[in-house]
Amino acid sequence: MDRPNKPSAISPSGTGPQPSVHSERGRVVASLPTGDSVEILLYGATVISWKANGRENLWVSEAAKLDGNKPVRGGVPIVFPCFGPPPKDHATGSLSQHGFARNSTWEYLGKSTSESEGKLASGGDDSIKLDFGLSSSQLTEDNKKAWGYDFALVYSVTLKRDGLQTMLSVRNQGEKAFEFQMLLHTYFRIDDISKVAINGLGSTTYVDKVLDATTHTQSSPSLTITGEIDRVYSGIKQDTTSITQDGKPRLDVTRDGISDSVVWNPWIQKAKGMGDFEPKDGYKNMVCVEVGAVDGWQKLEAGETFEGGMIVKSHA
């Protein structure tokens, strides 16, 4: 796909170790001199691994399909242009659940140095940005018929020391306005769900999908998970939602340009009912804290661009 500011190859900063990137067998892997790394499938532009300080921060099912056969169960699937089953009376009504971004093959646009926070002590670069693109011309014929708008997505994945930034840019390249929703459906790996708390959602209104999509307001500043949870929080005032484990900081998830989040864990029965969820007790080691724009619809007029995503910090 065409992109006005396609990233150029990294120019070494001079002395010191440099980030490394290699692409093979439908995936792109980047590493920093610190050992931090990220791995992205071209199928769905799905981030399937992010390691910081030698620790894996993303959960991927042992039964996940990584061959382009179906959307990946785990990692960071991209939801676009609809969240959940689309309403039949909407322009997205003929699409499958969560839209087509997560099961389309994206193009790797290249690598670049990002606006770095500085150099490593050794003189090497401390961050690297990878860009992926998906446009209307790359869709299957079925998806083109189901959602016939001219669009371009650019998904930027930036690996930093102890951090990962993922940003989705949506551009309307056609002459007709269109509406969409987007969500980064992130599965975080944790040690024990019974020892996890999620902070930063207090006093926020949410739709509880477990309780017949009824609306509630979270009274407690801290959320603990003791059963199936599927909540859509909207209009969150605090930018950052933090995950603690045993009372200690584990991950900080900061929304950028968006104000909604979903918290999901299938728990025992739901996990048993999903064929691609393994091990069946894997719900103990994962929690989804997903950032997006899913409360209503985002409207883009011809030529307009939307951008939103997240910055995640890992605590050792």
Image: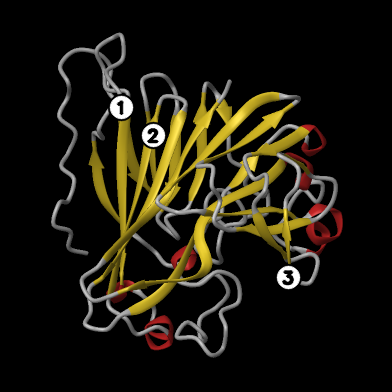
Badge 1 or badge 3: first in the primary sequence: 1
For the point 45% across and 86% down, the residue is 91
Residue 96 is left or right of residue 139, and the answer is right
Mark closest to the chain's N terminus, 2 or 3? 2
Taking 297 as reference, is 255 above or below it?
above
Task: Identify the residue position indicated by label 2 in the image.
Answer: 159
User: For the residues marked 2 and 3, what is the alpha-carbon distance in whole angstroms?
Assistant: 36 Å
Circles 2 and 3, Cβ within 8 Å, touching? The answer is: no
Hey, which residue is sitting farthest top in the picture? Answer: 121
Q: Nearer the viewer, mark 1 or mark 3?
A: 3
Check disc 2 and give the amino acid type: Leu
Residue that badge 1 annotates: 19
Taking the image as shown, residue 216 lies to the left or right of residue 73, namely: right
The quadrant in which the C terminus is found is top right
**How many numbered discs, if any?**
3
Residue 292's label in the rendered image is: none
Residue 78 shows in this picture: no
Q: Are marks 2 and 1 in contact (CB under 8 Å)?
A: yes
Question: Which residue is at 84% across, 51% downward?
Answer: 227
Against 67, is 226 above or below? above
Amino acid type, residue under disc 1 in the picture: Pro
Q: Position of residue 123 (x, y in %)?
A: 24, 12
Distance Cα–Cα, label 1 vs label 3? 45 Å
What colour scheme governs how the chains and residues are painted in the rendered image of this protein? secondary structure
Type of amino acid under label 3: Ala
- Percent from the top left, x then y, of residue 90? 49, 86
Residue 213: which numbered mark, if any?
Answer: 3
Q: In screen coordinates, is 241 left or right of 258?
A: right
Helix, strand or loop status at disc 1: loop
